[in-house]
Amino acid sequence: MIPTSRLLALLVSAVLVAGACSTGGAATSAPPAESPTAVPAATPDPDDLLALVKTAGTIRISTDPNYAPQSVLKPDGTYEGFDIDVANKIAAGLGVKVEFITPGWDTITAGSWGGRWDISVGSMTILADRTKVLDFSVPYYYTPAQLAATKASGITTLDGFAGKTICVGDSTTYQYWLEGTLDPAIKALTPPAGATAFKLPTDQNCAEAIQAGRTESDGMLTSNTVIEQAIGAGVPMVKVGDPVYNEELAVAIDKSGPPHADLVAAIDKIITDMHSDGTLKALSEKWFGVDLTTKVGE
């Protein structure tokens, strides 16, 4: 038998050994994992068009002064329309003012702007050929291309335009469709057999020609928004058939100008945010009476 005093001594020794082992284990435990290192934000390019625009405090935007309801120059020298509102929202998002420039449409789509303006907010369709000379933002809205016939022509169907003349704006997708050169990536109906294009500088000039009683064409092809506006203003014509195709419309920037990756990214974010928060939908309903900010089929 072990004496009581001896037993107590053994117990005290065991406790001390266990404590020492426990302390030693804690000292050799693995250190906590380090937090991942944050990726630094990209440094803005001081030579990018975004930096140049911000330094100037103004962004120069090309638009059409006669393309209601997208854009129109008012008698007081100010502009209004859907594209104008979008342009002003983009400028506000960039923290700068707007100066509107009004070159010809064929000049805008040809690229090589020579620094005369910074971007185009003019309902430009994204086309493969245009991407050779222009860069584009994400689309800000979508429009159907619509045929309309003069009331005098008596045409009521798409086939009724066979062998007839249709007025279109120069260097537009409407001209390309009639001539069979529209970007094949755009799903479109087949043009009427033998139909030919009568070109004027802008789509609105076609409506004005019909309103004036000119007889060079039997109708016109343009955005449904312009057709609706013209008919509402009393132009003697009627819509014919369903839209012949749909267009994705975006902001354009000249490839031959200053670097502009930062500006494109900034504009893309502004447009995406306006899609998300309903701003573009509200502007579309204001000017067109319908939401054209969702791609057809989605």
Image (cartoon, rainbow, N blue to C red):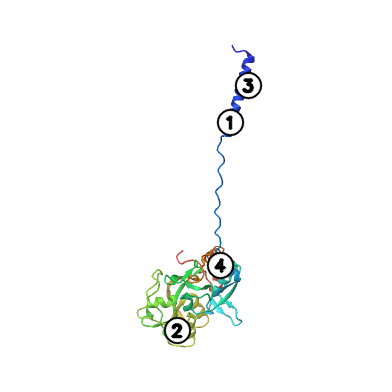
User: In the image as oriented, which residue stretches furthest toward the front?
Assistant: 47
Q: Which residue is mark 3?
A: 12
Is residue 165 or residue 249 the one in the foreground? Answer: 249
The amino acid pointed to by label 4 is Leu
> Which residue is disc 2 drawn over?
151
Instruction: Give whichever of discs 3 and 4 has the lower sequence position.
Output: 3
Task: Give the distance between the C-alpha atoms of the residues marked 3 and 1, in whole angstroms.
Answer: 19 Å
Residue 115 spot, x, y in % from top left: 52, 74
Disc 3 from disc 4: Cα separation: 77 Å
Farthest residue, direction top: 1
Q: Nearer the viewer, mark 3 or mark 4?
A: 4
Judge left or right: residue 6 versus residue 250.
Answer: right
> In the rendering, which numbered label is found on residue 50?
4
Mark 3 → mark 2, Cα distance in angstroms: 112 Å
Q: Residues within 10 Å of mark 4 (few under 14, many from 20)?
A: many
Sequence-first tag of 4 and 1: 1
Q: Residue at x 49, y 76 (%)?
A: 108
Please, is residue 284 above or below residue 42 in the view?
below
Mark 3 burial class by Cα count in 10 Å: few <14, some 14-19, many 20+: few
Residue 24: which numbered mark, if any? 1
Q: Nearer the viewer, residue 22 or 184?
A: 22
The residue lying at 42 percent from left, 78 percent from top is 175
Looking at this view, is 243 or 295 the one in front? 295
Relative image position of residue 224 (x, y in whole percent): 48, 75
